[in-house]
């Protein structure tokens, strides 16, 4: 039986199908969205559908996604996770930058844009920081001790980096690219399962391209009267009880489709075919 919820850090209970807010921005994740009212409507509808975990980052916009979330949702609507560690430019590049002083500055910016006193889940966006990895993880630990951050997460890490970080701070979540067509980080997921750490798979439907899994997804979707996207998300929910998929969209229509994935049950045979 698929677990409906996960306890982030042991005490923040969320429904396991979340929402990724990267697309609530302009083209190339830069600037304001073309239709900010639609972006707000997507967030509002997500909450109405029972989505209570929203993931963003200070680099989405930059700052735009956090601002829209802060202006649209109240702190009681959802657990909000954000990240620090990447810069953006007009060319759309993702530039690693995450020294301790930078992170201490960025957390203040995120708190202001989100309109909260404490960030529910604050994630290091990349381990490729300026200086020793342990130093910036220690900074996240200090932000937690200071009450600015409730829980600490990591993103784009391998098992060895996860272990090093856990020597410094309690790690509540790991966010890596992962989906039915890309299981490169299976070993990280297994490490998270062993430690009861939430695993947040980003690009959970592979940006719509799931490669060699596309045909079997379509077959299963036809049998289940669902879409291939819904089956891909359902597979993530079935595959491990610690996964918290965060499909993102700027469309209410696609949001409704994504949320419907939580109701798609898969048989052992279907799971085996998708996992081959």
Image: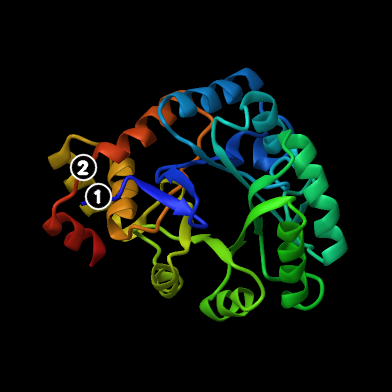
Out of 226 and 144, give the one closest to the viewer: 144
- Residue drawn at the location 32% of the way across and 60% of the way down: 240
Q: Is residue 89 visible?
A: no
Above or below, comparing residue 225 to residue 125 in the picture? above
Name the spot of residue 39 as percent of width and height, x first: 59, 25
Count of numbered tags: 2
Quarter location, residue 242: bottom left
Quarter location, residue 50: top left
Out of 137 and 227, give the one closest to the viewer: 137
Name the spot of residue 149 as percent of width and height, x first: 69, 52
Above or below, comparing residue 122 to residue 20 in the picture? below
Q: Which mark is residue 221?
A: 2
Tell me if 52 is positioned left or right of 225 in this view.
right
Tell me if 117 is positioned left or right of 250 in this view.
right
- Residue drawn at the location 54% of the way across and 35% of the way down: 78
Tell me if 40 is positioned left or right of 266 in this view.
right
| Element class at badge 1 | helix
Q: Is residue 115 visible?
A: yes
- Residue drawn at the location 68% of the way across and 29% of the way down: 68
Report how far apart the C-alphas of labels 2 and 1 lie in the structure.
6 Å
- Residue drawn at the location 29% of the way across and 59% of the way down: 239
Where does label 1 land, which residue? 217
Q: Quadrant of the C terminus?
A: bottom left
- The crowding category of the residue bearing disc 1, from other C-alpha atoms within 10 Å (few below 14, some 14 to 19, many at least 20), is many
Name the spot of residue 22 as percent of width and height, x first: 60, 42
């Amino acid at each position: 039986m698929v677990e409906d919820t996960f306890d982030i850090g042991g005490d923040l209970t969320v429904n396991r199908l979340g929402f990724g807010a990267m697309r609530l921005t302009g083209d190339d994740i830069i600037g304001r969205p073309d239709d900010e009212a639609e972006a707000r409507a997507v967030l509002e509808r997500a909450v109405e559908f029972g989505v209570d975990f929203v993931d963003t980052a200070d680099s989405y916009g930059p700052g735009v996604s956090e601002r829209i979330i802060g202006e649209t949702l109240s702190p009681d609507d959802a657990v909000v996770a954000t990240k620090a560690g990447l810069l953006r430019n007009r060319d759309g590049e993702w530039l690693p930058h995450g020294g301790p002083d930078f992170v201490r500055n960025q957390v203040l910016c995120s708190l202001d844009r989100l309109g909260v006193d404490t960030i529910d889940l604050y994630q290091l966006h990349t381990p490729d920081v300026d200086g020793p990895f342990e130093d910036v993880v220690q900074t996240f630990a200090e932000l937690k001790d200071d009450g600015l951050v409730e829980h600490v997460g990591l993103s784009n890490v391998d098992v060895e980096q996860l272990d090093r970080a856990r020597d410094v701070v309690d790690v509540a979540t790991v966010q890596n690219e992962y989906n039915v067509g890309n299981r490169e980080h299976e070993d990280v997921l297994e490490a998270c399962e062993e430690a009861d750490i939430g695993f947040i798979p980003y690009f959970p439907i592979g940006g719509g391209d799931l490669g060699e899994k596309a045909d079997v997804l379509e077959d299963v979707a036809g049998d289940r009267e669902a879409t291939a996207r819904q089956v891909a998300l359902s597979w993530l929910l079935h595959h491990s009880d610690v996964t918290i998929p965060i499909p993102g969209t700027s469309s209410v229509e696609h949001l409704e489709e994504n949320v419907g994935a939580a109701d798609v049950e898969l048989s052992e045979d279907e799971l085996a075919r998708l996992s081959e």
